[in-house]
Image (cartoon, grey):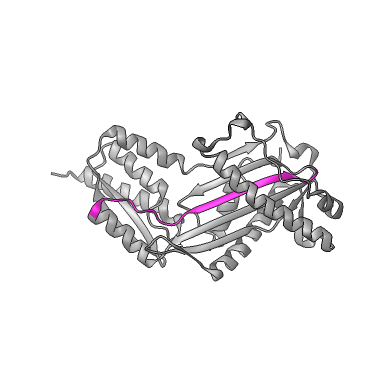
């Protein structure tokens, strides 16, 4: 027999989960939402809500908590909640650019958006990508303006052919090195023993010509790979959850932001974002993503 208090608690739990996932985009149940599901099961909640969004319409379903040991639920909940976090690294823990206020060259945000199919493949959406780049660049300008530092957009700089080649080389090097950092610094099983826990990454000496052209000492790079569950994937997520009790992941948002010393190519600050939430297809979503990626940025206002 379910009391009125119990029914009210269930409705409130469903409402809170629905509101929390509203910002997750068309991804299906996100990692944070699933973590909350396990936590609610751990605390004895009778039901939990799963929200999947597609085309702006929410599909809200309730399902009984699985009969699992509280230890297993606690472990899964902790793992998934940890996945909602970002973690940044500094080459020098005492680095604070707000004191010296050097010029920072801002590279355009490298964004790619795709639709996740039922089979798990990614289909790049050119329209989404174009819109996201516009939203993200504008969000970055607003955020950096709030920091009050000296920021130079690379679009306003004048490069000759040789300097453009240096810029292209630096961008390619950053793409390679940021992927290596994400793998070897954030995955404990892939840690490099020669680094001995240090944050020690370099892009080479390509930045000197850029300094001469722009006067900027540092370069800020941001890249984001965003995917969203398509209609087929949403149906698979809902069916697997309701019929089999199996969690099928939706889209993901993977991003990196790094600050590079152009004088020697050293990566002085790096942050990675990896989650099943966020949405670059809207102005508000882009602002939230940029703000999250720049968590811990060393050029903040004092």
Q: Residue furthest bottom?
A: 127
Q: Quadrant of residue 185?
A: top right
Q: Residue 149 at what x, y percent from top left?
A: 75, 47
User: Where residue 41 sits in the image (x, y, percent)?
Assistant: 28, 40
Q: Quadrant of residue 229?
A: bottom left
Q: Residue at x 76, y 56 (%)?
A: 167
Question: Left of 238 or right of it: where is 175?
Answer: right
Does the magenta segment cover residue 55? no
Please identify the residue farthest to the left as the structure is shown: 1
**Residue found at x 45% / y 39%:** 82
| Nearer the observer, 112 or 103 | 112
Q: Which residue in the rendered view is the most extreme toward the front?
A: 194
Q: Which residues are magenta?
A: 244-263
Instruction: Please say if 86 is above or below 71.
Output: below
Residue 73 as seen in the image, left or right of residue 217: left
Residue 47 lies, with reference to residue 110, above or below; the image says: above
Q: Please tell me which residue lies in front, 85 or 48.
A: 85
The picture places residue 159, in percent across and down from the top left corner, at 83, 61
């Amino acid at each position: 027999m379910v009391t009125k208090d119990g029914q009210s608690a269930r409705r409130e739990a469903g409402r809170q989960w629905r509101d929390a996932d509203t910002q997750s985009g068309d991804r299906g149940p996100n990692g944070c939402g699933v973590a909350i599901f396990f936590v609610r099961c751990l605390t004895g909640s009778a039901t939990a809500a799963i929200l999947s969004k597609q085309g702006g319409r929410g599909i809200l379903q309730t399902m009984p908590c699985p009969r699992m040991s509280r230890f297993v639920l606690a472990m899964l909940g902790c793992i998934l909640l940890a996945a909602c976090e970002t973690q940044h690294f500094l080459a020098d823990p005492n680095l604070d650019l707000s004191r010296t206020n050097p010029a920072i060259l801002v590279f355009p945000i490298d964004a790619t958006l795709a639709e996740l199919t039922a089979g798990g493949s990614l289909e790049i959406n050119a329209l989404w990508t174009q819109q996201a780049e516009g939203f993200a660049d504008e969000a970055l300008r607003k955020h950096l303006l709030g920091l009050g530092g000296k920021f130079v957009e690379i679009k306003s700089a004048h490069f000759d052919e040789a300097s453009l080649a240096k810029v292209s080389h630096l961008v390619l090097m950053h793409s390679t090195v940021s992927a290596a950092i994400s793998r070897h610094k954030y995955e404990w099983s892939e840690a490099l023993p020669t680094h001995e826990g240090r944050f020690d990454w370099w892009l080479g000496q390509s930045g000197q010509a850029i300094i001469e052209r722009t006067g900027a000492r540092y370069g800020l790079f941001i890249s984001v790979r965003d995917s969203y569950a398509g209609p087929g994937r949403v149906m698979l997520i809902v069916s697997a959850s309701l019929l089999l009790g199996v969690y099928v992941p939706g889209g993901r948002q993977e991003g990196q932001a790094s600050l590079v010393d152009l004088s020697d190519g050293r990566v002085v600050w790096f942050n990675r974002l990896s989650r099943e939430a966020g949405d670059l297809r809207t102005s508000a979503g882009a602002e939230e993503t940029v703000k999250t990626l720049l968590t811990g940025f060393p050029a903040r206002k004092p």
